Image (cartoon, rainbow, N blue to C red):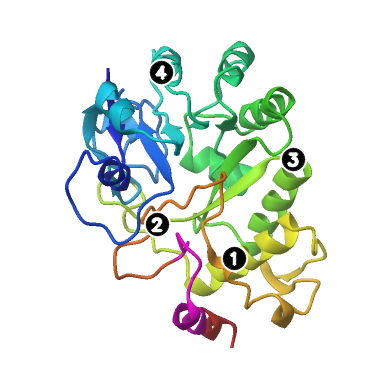
Amino acid sequence: MKVRVSYGSAIKLGLLKKKIDCLPMTIYLMTMGSCTGKCSFCAQANNSGSEMLSRVIWPEFSLEDVLKNLKDERVCIQCLNYKNLFDDVLEIVENIDNEISVSAQPFSEKELKTLSRKIDRIGISLDCANKVLFKKIKPTYSWNEHWKKLEKAVEIFGDFKVTSHLIVGLGETEEDMVKIIQKLYRKKIKPSLFAFTPLRGTPLENKKRPSLKKYRRIQLAYHLITENISNDFRFKNGEIIDFGVKIEEYIEDPVIYTTKGCPKCNRPYFNESPGGTIYNYPYLPDKKEMEEILKIWE
């Protein structure tokens, strides 16, 4: 059986003899089918056959070679949408004894229960912060169905064992993003933050990336919500004007600016290019990097 392996994961596994300045903490795999989804931001949409997912290249390897080199790392399986997907996922997870996350479109309740016996986390991504954007950007799917399956997955997997990706910069306001993070957290679903990344060949290839200032403000709001520090936000014209706390007491915490998602998921370069603007730090930013980050708050 063949699988795709993220470029960084392939280097970490010794499948590629290349240099990289930051290795992933999780081994990221992707299924081999052609995706029938039509998500406007995704290079895999509409059976594109692209070797990209976000900014990352995913070369092909045999599952056998992956397993031979796998140690004790968490494994995350990224799922494309095609007819026999569940069978492929089941075959992969049945061969892996490590902690496993699966990120996919909504599976049936029966399929979720089957997977729960082999994996410890499931991801069902909303990506969009509101229903209007979802309908426009993810036309293959249903907002209501995603929410139903997210809630069912929590019943099956347990509190905060279910993740949902959110992409900042698709056209939502800061208020939209804060409210969806609050709703997910209230329902005991773990939000995972991404910055929109324009990719050549997609319908959104000419859309601008979110400003770093907006992204940092959402990262702070995420931290305050998920650490149960504040839910008392105030907004004006969709922007946060009050975080409910004195932000000076929190903004110097480097954890705020790191990748958010499943445990041990640092996703190097999913949103970034080497040497470019860093939205999600795949490690704790150092003193010099924190000085640069804090300029945003001046």
Circle 2: element type: loop
Distance in Å between CA atoms under marks 3 and 4: 29 Å
Residue at the spot of label 4: 95
Viewer-side residue, 70 vs 85: 70
Distance in Å between CA atoms under marks 2 and 1: 18 Å
Where the N terminus falls, by quadrant?
top left
Q: Is residue 223 left or right of residue 38?
A: right
Q: Amino acid at mark 4?
A: Asn
- Place residue 77 in its image quadrant: top left
Q: Is residue 64 left or right of residue 127?
A: left
Residue at the spot of label 3: 188
Residue in the picture at 39% in, 64% down: 208
- Place residue 243 in its image quadrant: bottom right
Label 1–label 4 contact, CB within 8 A? no
- Frontmost of labels 3 and 1 is 1
Q: Residue furthest left?
A: 17
The percent coordinates of residue 115 (x first, y second) are 56, 18
Where the C terminus falls, by quadrant?
bottom right
Residue at the spot of label 2: 271
Mark 4 or mark 2: whose residue is earlier in sequence: 4
Mark 3 or mark 2: whose residue is earlier in sequence: 3
Circle 3: element type: loop
Viewer-side residue, 149 vs 169: 149
Q: Residues within 10 Å of mark 3 (few under 14, many from 20)?
A: some
Distance in Å between CA atoms under marks 3 and 1: 21 Å
Q: Amino acid at mark 1?
A: Val
Circle 4: element type: loop
Label 3–label 2 contact, CB within 8 A? no
The percent coordinates of residue 242 (x first, y second) are 76, 74
Which label belongs to residue 255? 1
